[in-house]
Amino acid sequence: MFKRIEIHIAIIENAMVAQCPFIMWGYTMTSSSSCEAKYTAKRKKSKAHYEQAKKHLPAGVESNIRLFEPHPFIAKEGKGPYLYDIDGNKLIDFALGYGPLILGHRRPEVIKAVKEQLNRGTMFGSPTLNALEYVKLIKKALPSIELFRFTNTGSEATMYPLRVARAYTGKEKIAKAEGSYHGGYDYMMQSVDIPDDVMQKGKKCQPAVTWGKGLPKCISDLAVIYPFNEWDETEEIIRKNADELAAVIIEPVHAGGGCVIPRGDYLKRLRRLTKELGIVLIFDEVLTGFRLAFGGAQERFDVKPDITAVAKVAGGGFQLGGFGGSKEIMEEILPSDEGNVYHGGTYNAHAVSVAAGLATLKILSKPGIYSKIDRIGDMFFNGIIDVAEDRKVDLWVEHVGSLGQIFFTDKEVRTWRDEQETDREKWEKWFLNALTGGIFFGVPHPDGHAFTSLAHSQEDIKRALEIASAAFKAVA
């Protein structure tokens, strides 16, 4: 995962300039306006549209993560590895819808499946043929799943397993890693981020801190926080709270704060510990499922959880998620005179979404697909290391297959707290310089991540590295 390869690229010496202002999730930069002016000059229609949108949408965007200064670009269409905005600018896309589009935009087989389903209908209020075929493919990919239920979003896909685990164990507390993101509902909006004035410096972890306003304080009492990749502390915290813990939920690759790969036997130790203590282990594979391998992170790292949550790639670009696990645990959902765990949703297994997801998983199940996906991912993320070194920029790159993130630092990043010590201002300047030059580098936030796809060619990667190099020069 950390092996470097040599990438020979042409260097664009004067493609972009430094000092670009940028804002995201409360981080604000102040700097000269040259890069901002260049960005805005190429996106006059986007700026005008954004100014209108601010009159109708909070901050002018559909979700906070899409907001950055001087203004977001307005997408018009996508094709393969490219995005086109309403001003006609072409971008090499490494955001890919924030993860789902592992096949790229408008993959013909997916579009065909969607059109065929549209011609048959969209909503039936009754089970459909494709849903069963889809679940059979899910179980083939993830043998830890014996029974599976659909949801519409990744948030729902992680929310319901918490309810199931509480019913199964009769306990209420849930352990989650500091800095991890498992969806936008109250129970998991704990210690996703910690304000500087609240952060307990010098510690590897601290008790739950609510993330944002509007959350009941009592919810924090049900959250047990542990530090990802710090095994001794993780074990101590889980053992101390074992009598009250229904579940431990984890992103097998810590992606809520960017991208941090589990070190050593961290996941296997966690599996052994939760089994010993009778605690349900939930893998949040919303991001890693079908991206790191057909069998997700549990295949890549050879660890099987009790319950798995999936979404993003699982829907092939449409609203689809789900969760599944052992028969014994999942049967808590079965209707019963004694009561059961409620699970429902009008749009669960929406016919169009299932058609898109099924077409996507069929492609991904073919032999050799992931070797192609990983080869492009290695070329891109290892190439980023090379061009940063050429520009004498200190950088740490974490990546596994087609998922990765860059951190501006001269130290190893192995924990969420390590990520907080990186140079975020430099990342933000680099991001906007790269965007101005023609690449959309993933989630527009230093705690985000970037993705490659099956649609990216070697030529796309070489061109992207040229632009990235010029952006490194701008912030060096």
Image: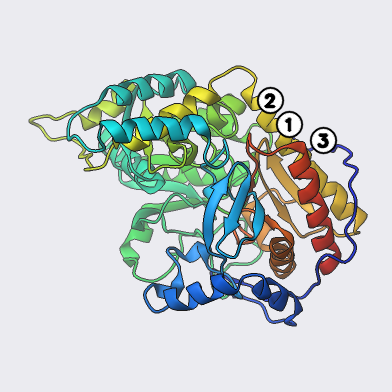
Which is more foreground, mark 3 or mark 2?
A: 2
Q: Residue at x 43, y 31 (%)?
A: 112
- The answer to whether the residue labelled 2 contacts the one labelled 1, judged by CB atoms less than 8 Å apart, is yes
User: Is residue 302 positioned above or below 406 on the image?
Assistant: above
Image position of 382 with respect to 448: above or below: above
At x 41% / y 34%, what residue is drawn?
356
**Label 3 element class:** loop
Tell me which residue sits at (83%, 53%) in the image.
466
Q: Earlier in the sequence, mark 3 or mark 2?
A: 3
Q: Amino acid at mark 2?
A: Ser
Comes first in the chain, label 1 or label 3: 3
Distance from Cα at disc 1 to Cα at disc 3: 12 Å
**At 78% from the left edge and 59% from the top edge, which residue is drawn?**
409
Query: Percent x, y for residue 63?
Result: 44, 63
Give the class, few, some or many, for how many residues have Cα within 10 Å of label 2's Cα (few <14, many ≥20): few
Pick the front one: 193 or 466? 466
Is 435 in front, or is 381?
435
Badge 1 density bin: few <14, some 14–19, many ≥20, Cα 10 Å: some
Q: Is residue 226 left or right of residue 34?
A: left
State left or right for residue 382 relative to residue 450. right
Q: Which residue is mark 3?
A: 3
Q: In which quadrant will I find the N terminus?
A: top right
Three-letter amino acid code of the residue under disc 1? Arg
Residue ID for mark 2: 371
Q: Is residue 371 found left or right of 8 in the rendered image?
A: left
Residue 375 numbered mark, or none:
1
| Type of amino acid at the residue the image marks with label 3 | Lys
Q: Position of residue 253 (x, y in %)?
A: 59, 41
Note whether 463 is above or below 246 in the view shown. Answer: below
